[in-house]
Amino acid sequence: MALRWLQRALERGAEAAYPPGALVVAEDGAWFRPPQAWRIELGCRTHLRTLLLALAEARAKTPGTPLTREALLRVGWPGERVMPRAGASRVYVSILELRDLGLRDLLQSSAGGYMLDPAVDVVAAGAAPQTGARR
């Protein structure tokens, strides 16, 4: 337990450099920190990591423009051929999981797809060693 407390204290110290009101995303997608919240580890959830990175990149390049379900499917499951309905379900479930992990207020949906809230700053952070998933 003491090791866990020390690890959290070190994380808080390292993350103090980032604006508290920003969404901070590791450059490799291994973790993110919602505004005014704890860091969330994505661990080996590669689909969530790649979707989050794609959403953060789209937010940086074209704020306010959503990524389509088809684009997210190509990013999250590259090279896989799936039926349209199954692909839409994969994306929907992954977006739901990202929302449940702490992005509920930041992950917006529109008729065109999904995007990170353009009103919230998104900051890229250096990758950290994986320490396990935390909710």
Image (cartoon, rainbow, N blue to C red):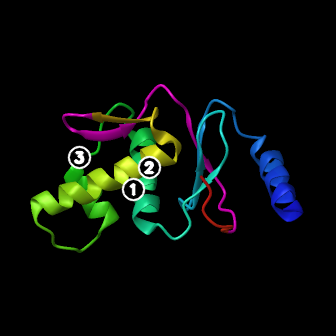
Q: Which residues are magenta?
A: 110-129
* Residue 51: image tag: 1
Badge 2 amino acid = Leu
Question: For residue 115, which quarter of the picture?
Answer: top left
The residue type indicated by label 3 comes to Thr
Camera-nearest label, 3 or 2: 2
Whether 115 is among the magenta residues is yes
Q: Point out residue 56 in the picture as x, y percentages from the top left corner.
A: 46, 46
Q: Which mark is residue 68?
A: 3
Secondary element under disc 2, as helix, strand or loop, is helix
From the top left corner, tell me how far across and down residue 45 is, in percent: 47, 66
User: Pointer 2: residues within 10 angstroms few (<14), some, or many (20+)?
Assistant: some
Marks 3 and 1, the one that precedes in the sequence:
1
- Indicate which disc residue 98 carries: 2
Comparing labels 1 and 2, the label whose residue is closer to the camera:
2
Q: Which mark is residue 43?
A: none
Q: Earlier in the sequence, mark 3 or mark 2?
A: 3
Q: CA distance from mark 3 to mark 1?
A: 12 Å
